[in-house]
Amino acid sequence: MAFVAVQPSNTNNDKGGQGEDFGKSSPVGLVLLILFFIAVFFLVKSMNKHLKRVPASFDEPAPTADEAAEEKKKD
């Protein structure tokens, strides 16, 4: 026994969501896109500002000769 799959006929003239306005963006989309770009700009600017404050290394700096001498005097 064989089964044949037949697509229903397209009698309602539906183009599958690709009507007259398909592919057109609205001015609201443009405004949102511009707002996102402005927000990303300020976030990057803020990130760079905070990263400049981060020390190059989190290791304790080696004591200088003067600090080492003062440590010995305390002991």
Image (cartoon, rainbow, N blue to C red):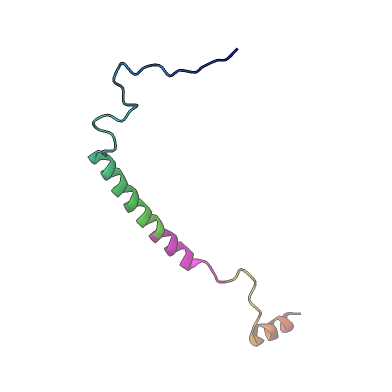
Q: Residue furthest top?
A: 1
Q: Is residue 19 above or below residue 2?
A: below
User: Splitting the image into 4 quarters, where does residue 41 fall?
Assistant: bottom left
| Magenta residues, dominant SS class | helix
| 46 vs 33, nearest the viewer | 33
Residue 21 on image: x %, y %: 25, 33
Is 50 covered by the magenta stretch?
yes
Count of numbered marks: 0
Residue 53 on image: x %, y %: 48, 67
| 23 vs 37, nearest the viewer | 23
| 45 vs 58, nearest the viewer | 45
Residue visible at 34% across and 48% down in the picture: 36
Residue 65 on image: x %, y %: 66, 87
Left or right for 51, reference 61: left
User: Splitting the image into 4 quarters, where does residue 63 fall?
Assistant: bottom right
Is 21 covered by the magenta stretch?
no
| Magenta region, residue range | 45-56
Residue visible at 45% across and 17% down in the picture: 6
User: Splitting the image into 4 quarters, where does residue 59 fall?
Assistant: bottom right
Q: Is residue 60 above or below residue 21?
A: below
| 68 vs 30, nearest the viewer | 30
Q: Quadrant of the C terminus?
A: bottom right
Q: Is residue 18 above or below residue 65?
A: above
Q: Residue furthest right?
A: 75
